[in-house]
Amino acid sequence: MRVTAALAFEGVSKTFLTGGLSVRALQSVDISIQVGKVTGLIGPDGAGKTTLMKLAMGQIQPDSGTLRVCGLSHPTGLKGIRNRIGYVPEEPPFLPNRRVEEIARFAGPFFDHWDSS
């Protein structure tokens, strides 16, 4: 099977509870980013850019809809997804007092092809 979409969202919605209020970050998003294309997500704060990327990386789950990354579906293909793409978050999730070697030793087991050299 030839994968044509690097990232495909179909009817994806995500809502967060914040201070007792329901805040819709994404509503029925349909997007397809083709393999080999450079794409930027541009929009004001709160537009859903970070939510979209966290969903793609499997850090959060959608309320509804389906998504595929490199032809792999969530959540069954999550490890394969992480092996195929890289993601740099806005705020690093690591503690500031950790050395790079410690972070690499921690992160390596999450990836099939980790190069610790």
Image (cartoon, rainbow, N blue to C red):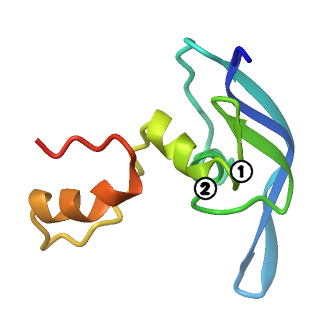
- Within 10 angstroms of label 2, few (less than 14), some, or many (20 or more) residues? some
Residue at figure coordinates x 71%, y 14% from the top left = 2
Q: Quadrant of the N terminus?
A: top right
Q: Marks 1/2: CA distance?
A: 7 Å
Residue at figure coordinates x 45%, y 40% from the top left = 83
Q: Quadrant of the C terminus?
A: top left
Could you say which is closer to the camera, residue 8 or residue 109? 109
Mark 1 / mark 2, whichever is N-terminal: 2
Q: Position of residue 75 (x, y in %)?
A: 70, 55
- Check residue 23 in the rendering and tell me which mark sits there, or answer none: none
Q: Quadrant of residue 93?
A: bottom left
The amino acid on which the numbered mark 2 sits, given as a three-letter code, is Gly
Q: Is residue 116 left or right of residue 8?
A: left
Q: Is residue 5 left or right of residue 12?
A: left
Q: Secondary structure at mark 2?
A: loop
Q: Which residue is mark 1?
A: 74
Q: Position of residue 112 (x, y in %)?
A: 39, 46
Q: Which residue is mark 2?
A: 58
Q: Position of residue 111 (x, y in %)?
A: 39, 49
Whether the residues at callouts 1 and 2 have beta carbons within 8 Å, the answer is yes
Q: Is residue 65 left or right of residue 84?
A: right
Residue at figure coordinates x 14%, y 70% from the top left = 98
Q: Which-is-in-front pick, marks 1 and 2?
A: 1
The amino acid on which the numbered mark 1 sits, given as a three-letter code, is His
